[in-house]
């Protein structure tokens, strides 16, 4: 059996690894560490939870024992798609590099530029950054990357989803051509393969699991539910309460708004719950994630900002409140459970309109997913038939999941990039009676307008007002105890005829 001592790591690194309680490397570590120490380029393909972070952190620590960083000229650079992943890599360097005296600098949004500038001024042996914030410092003239000897591009497929590829191409132009490059991705779509061919020179390819595979330790099930949000929320609560072995869980939604709504719903029903999405400030995101790691909260409702690489080993369950629109996101979401050989469970809530997304997922992972109540259960669900095209939640293929991945897009303080939204007016449902309206009368001149007559108040106006207040109080009480959707705002689902003229 191979041990870390057989991989060529330095004694300082081996000591830190032993103190952390590890003796046997994972397949990705065993495959990546020796060629990395030989200064070879690496193309690593591994599903999440396989230990690939240590696969590049440990050899980097060994190689950095010789040499010293100069001010504003980092020796190595690690690019991560999200703040959370960057912070996690920083924690790995602190854990395994405790016997080294290295300057590790973290450049992410939500943190003061001045504080980061002071750290860069002292020199960075390791620079860990999100692409946008790194470009910010570079464009300000605060950072020179001509001294970078080793570049790590982590979660490359996630970079693609978030639209970071143009930024990465710009960054690579600032780095010497003679650099060593370590390129890691959980999936390998054609775009990522083309990128790897551009950045890597005669790389060692390490593939420890088939691309887009899921861990065998995770039990996956589909759960049939109605298409209305209040029905899905009710079904989710039943599902959570039925899991006797649940210790903690991450619940994924496609949209940040749905994260907030579901968080409020679960909190109202007495669950220990927190929320995590890209519109939260960095302090809140960090505190919420730490509270979940420390078991201060049981359920974490999150967007796909939490789907990649976050190392929370003891997550027992994952619930997909929304079926991910992009099949690759399913692999990463359920990869949050069943890590390091532990058992895990992943439930995906499916409505009738989600069929094409489920088909794409099963095709990607090359296996059928079992239905919790049998495949016929989806036919018995209610609510979906009421939702016609253009009437329900927007879920176009280039909108929701890709857009939620842009939580950290363009790290200019990591604000989401603007997204163009089509302004289509939905057509009336086929089974509704046609609604026609007369053409509006021509506008009158101000002088021709007649004064509006005020209707006389009924004699029992006070009694009617009291009845209205009582009815409103009863309705408010019913809404507080019912998890149905809020009252429609504006026109609701009814579109006046004059708004459809010219459409």
Image: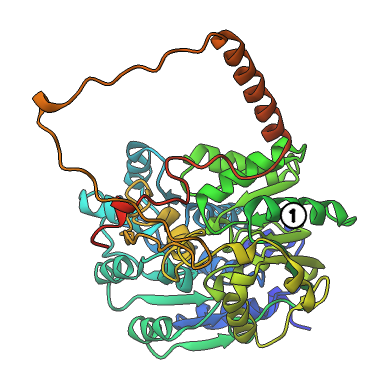
Please, which colouring scheme is shown?
rainbow
Tag count = 1
Find residue 360 and report its horizontal and vertical position in percent: 58, 81
Which image quadrant is residue 483 in?
top right
**Residue 247: x, y in percent?**
82, 52
The answer to whether residue 274 is visible is yes
Whether residue 130 sits left or right of residue 304 in the image: it is left
Quadrant for the C terminus in the image: bottom left
Q: Check the image and report above or below for 210 versus 348.
A: below
Residue at left offset 33%, top offset 68%:
168
Residue occupying the point 53% across, 83% down: 35
**Would residue 9 be visible to someone looking at this image?**
no
Viewer-side residue, 345 vs 401: 401
Q: Percent position (x, y) of residue 124? A: 39, 53
**Element type where label 1 sits in the image:** helix
Q: Which residue is mark 1?
A: 236
Corner quadrant of residue 290: top right
Residue under the point 73% across and 43% down:
294
* In front of the other: 372 or 123: 372
Q: Nearer the viewer, residue 500 or 95?
A: 500
Q: Residue at x 9, y 31 (%)?
A: 445
- Farthest right residue? 244
| Outermost residue to the bottom | 202
Q: Is residue 317 left or right of residue 99?
A: right
Q: Is residue 359 above or below residue 119?
A: below
Q: Is residue 398 left or right of residue 205?
A: left
- Is 359 rendered above or below residue 146? below
Where is residue 326 shown, x and y percent of the image? 52, 73
How packed mark 1 is, by other alpha carbons closer than 10 Å (few <14, some 14-19, many 20 or more), is many
Query: In the picture, which quadrant includes the N terminus?
Result: bottom right
């Amino acid at each position: 059996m191979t041990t870390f001592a057989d991989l060529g790591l330095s004694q300082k690194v081996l000591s830190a690894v032993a103190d952390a309680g590890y003796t046997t490397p994972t397949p990705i570590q065993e495959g990546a560490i020796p060629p990395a120490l030989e200064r070879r380029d690496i193309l690593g393909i591994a599903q999440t939870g396989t230990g690939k972070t240590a696969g590049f952190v440990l050899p980097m620590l060994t190689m950095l024992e010789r040499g010293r960083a100069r001010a504003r000229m980092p020796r190595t650079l690690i690019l991560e798609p999200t703040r959370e992943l960057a912070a996690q890599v920083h924690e790995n360097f602190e854990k395994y590099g405790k016997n080294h005296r290295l300057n590790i600098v973290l450049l992410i949004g939500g943190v003061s530029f001045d504080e980061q500038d002071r750290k860069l001024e002292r020199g960075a042996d390791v620079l860990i950054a999100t692409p946008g914030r790194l470009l910010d410092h570079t464009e300000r003239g605060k950072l020179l990357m001509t001294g970078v000897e080793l570049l790590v591009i982590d979660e490359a497929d996630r970079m693609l989803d978030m639209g970071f590829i143009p930024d990465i191409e710009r960054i690579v132009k600032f780095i010497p051509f003679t650099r060593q490059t370590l390129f890691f991705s959980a999936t390998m779509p054609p775009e990522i393969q083309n990128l790897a061919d551009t950045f890597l020179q005669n790389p060692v390819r390490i593939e420890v699991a088939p691309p887009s595979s899921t861990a065998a330790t995770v039990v996956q099930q589909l759960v049939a539910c109605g298409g209305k949000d209040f029905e899905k929320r009710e079904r989710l609560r039943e599902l959570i309460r039925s899991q006797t072995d649940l210790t903690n869980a991450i619940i994924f939604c496609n949209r940040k708004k749905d994260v907030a709504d579901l968080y409020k719903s679960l909190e109202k029903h007495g669950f220990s719950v927190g929320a995590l999405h890209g519109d939260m400030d960095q302090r809140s995101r960090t505190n919420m994630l730490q509270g979940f790691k420390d078991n201060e909260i049981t359920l974490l409702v999150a967007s796909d900002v939490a789907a990649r690489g976050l190392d929370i080993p003891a997550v027992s369950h994952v619930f997909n409140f929304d079926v991910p629109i992009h099949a690759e996101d399913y692999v990463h979401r359920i990869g949050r459970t069943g890590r390091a050989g532990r058992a895990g469970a992943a439930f995906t809530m499916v409505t009738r309109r989600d069929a094409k997304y489920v088909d794409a997922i099963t095709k990607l992972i090359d296996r059928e997913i079992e239905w919790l109540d049998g495949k016929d259960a989806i036919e018995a669900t209610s609510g979906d038939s009421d939702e016609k095209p253009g009437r329900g939640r927007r879920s176009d293929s280039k909108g929701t999941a890709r857009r939620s991945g842009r939580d950290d897009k363009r790290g200019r303080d990591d604000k989401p990039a603007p997204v163009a939204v089509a302004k289509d007016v939905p057509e009336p449902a086929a089974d509704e009676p046609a609604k026609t309206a007369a053409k509006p009368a021509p506008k009158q001149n101000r002088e021709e307008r007649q004064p509006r007559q005020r209707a006389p108040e009924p004699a029992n106006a006070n009694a009617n007002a009291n009845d209205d207040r009582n009815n409103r109080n009863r309705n408010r009480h019913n809404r507080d105890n019912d998890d149905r959707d809020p009252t429609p705002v504006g026109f609701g689902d009814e579109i006046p005829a004059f708004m459809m003229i010219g459409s």
